[in-house]
Image (cartoon, rainbow, N blue to C red):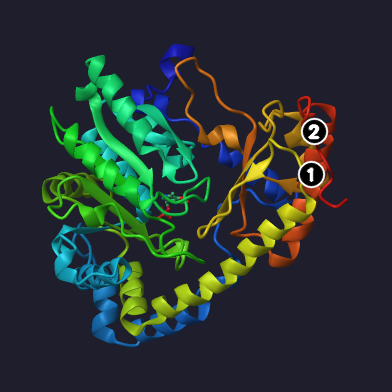
Amino acid sequence: MSEAASRLPFSAKSRRTVEQPISYLIQTALHNPHLINLAAGLVDPRTLPVEQCEQITQRLFGDDARARAALQYDTTLGLRTLRKELLSHLARVEQVPEGELGYSADDILVTTGSQQVLYLVGDVLLDPGDIVIAANPSYFVYTGTLTSLGATVVAAPMDEDGMDADAVEQVLLRLQREGRLSRVKLIYCTSYFDNPTGLTLSLPRRRKLLELARRFSTHHRIMIHEDAAYRELRYDGQPLPSIKSFDRENRHVIISNTFSKPFAPGIKLGYSAMPADLLDAVVQQKGNHDFGSANVCQYIALNALQSGMYQSHVQTLCQSYRAKRDAILQSLSRHMPKHPELSWTKPHGGLYVWLTLPADIDTRRSSRMFQRCVSAGVLYVPGDYCFVADEHGELPVNHLRLSFGQVAPEQIDAGIQRLAEVVAQEINEHGAPKMGQKVTSARA
Ligand SMILES: Cc1ncc(COP(=O)(O)O)c(C=O)c1O
């Protein structure tokens, strides 16, 4: 057989799909168990609800009728009793009566993790060349999904108040001037304790994003995909209403949630509320994928919610993550060199801290800094993974993401100390401050 004849004819979508950059980091961590892994976005293995799930499954399989139902297929939309329970749960989280949510249990879809609904919504709305507006930096698994679907990601910057809604407006106005507004289908926003920055979208910006989606919906309805994966991992500050809560007609916002972060990623369940016409199309497409998420997992989630185990687990989890969040912030203050261009976010929830280094320090995987960190025994996620290149193809390379999710509490200080020593070395060699700026050792 000739070489050409034996070649696999991969589809255009498959050819656009590349390996997730994080795979390399996972391999590096596996090969070097002594590394302190501040890269992994995993939840803490110590706080997984093992006993709760044991009790739930014993109850589930101790009841013949329930066990048979759980081991059977259910609908593509998801178990009805679970969707009703999720509606009550969402109303509790939103702190409004169910009737004020603007959607019903029939508008809720259960998916195989929230990643599946990110994919499915993209799949039913986006043709190659269509535009999604996302924050810069953004959740890089999703931007990879968008690339695979052939979409163009147009980035809007972020600041302490989350995605910059004024910048989104400027992007929309520019696209309108260029005659490209008809290609804009989605605005993607992680509205709570963002991955990778840990930052939260402010209340005025929540209202403004929805106002923009409404105002610029001249060719078709522009949707906002509100990714609320980390919403329930809140350690301080006031709860904020979702963008979805302002979409009382259920027309412009998809809100996706997950059991992965506040309960257990192993049950791989997500749930979303969205407009009925979009939901119909998404359900058809989910039918092509799996015609329904694992029913046993849906029964576990149902039981966890009905018994109150879920709610008390979230409280325990928040206490444990709050202590780790405090520990990482204290260690950063203690060990990081003082430099006017060195800063980090102070998240009120979630699993991430975002570190900004002086502009001439390169944190990329190919950089000396990254290699030095691996040699010193600490791993981070290079920030360039999370950025979309600007119109000149430029990516900022002086950021990094730290996660306090998986790391053991007693390793946090040592991990940050190792990182800080490499940062100090880099600053001394390259990132010395400009005239008039002063660097002092944090421990001095
Ligand atoms: C922002 C964000 N959205 C969605 C997901 C998907 O999670 P899952 O599919 O487990 O619900 C993740 C996972 O890390 C995430 O960080």
Residue under label 2, please give it: 427
Considering every residue shown, the one lying at the far right of the view is 444
Q: Mark 1 and 2 residues: CB-CB less than 8 Å, in contact?
A: yes
Q: Nearer the viewer, residue 61 or 5?
A: 61
Q: For this view, does 165 lie left or right of residue 247?
A: right
* Relative image position of residue 309 (x, y in whole percent): 41, 81
Q: Secondary structure at mark 2?
A: helix
Number of on-image labels = 2
* Relative image position of residue 214 (x, y in whole percent): 17, 39
Q: Is residue 11 visible?
A: no
Residue under label 1, please give it: 337
Q: Separation of disc 1 and disc 2 at Cα? A: 9 Å
Q: Nearer the viewer, residue 21 or 394?
A: 394
Q: Residue at x 52, y 70 (%)?
A: 318
Residue type indicated by callout 2: Ile
The picture quadrant where one finds residue 28 is top right
- Disc 1 C-beta below 8 A from ligand 1: no
* Relative image position of residue 158 (x, y in whole percent): 46, 38
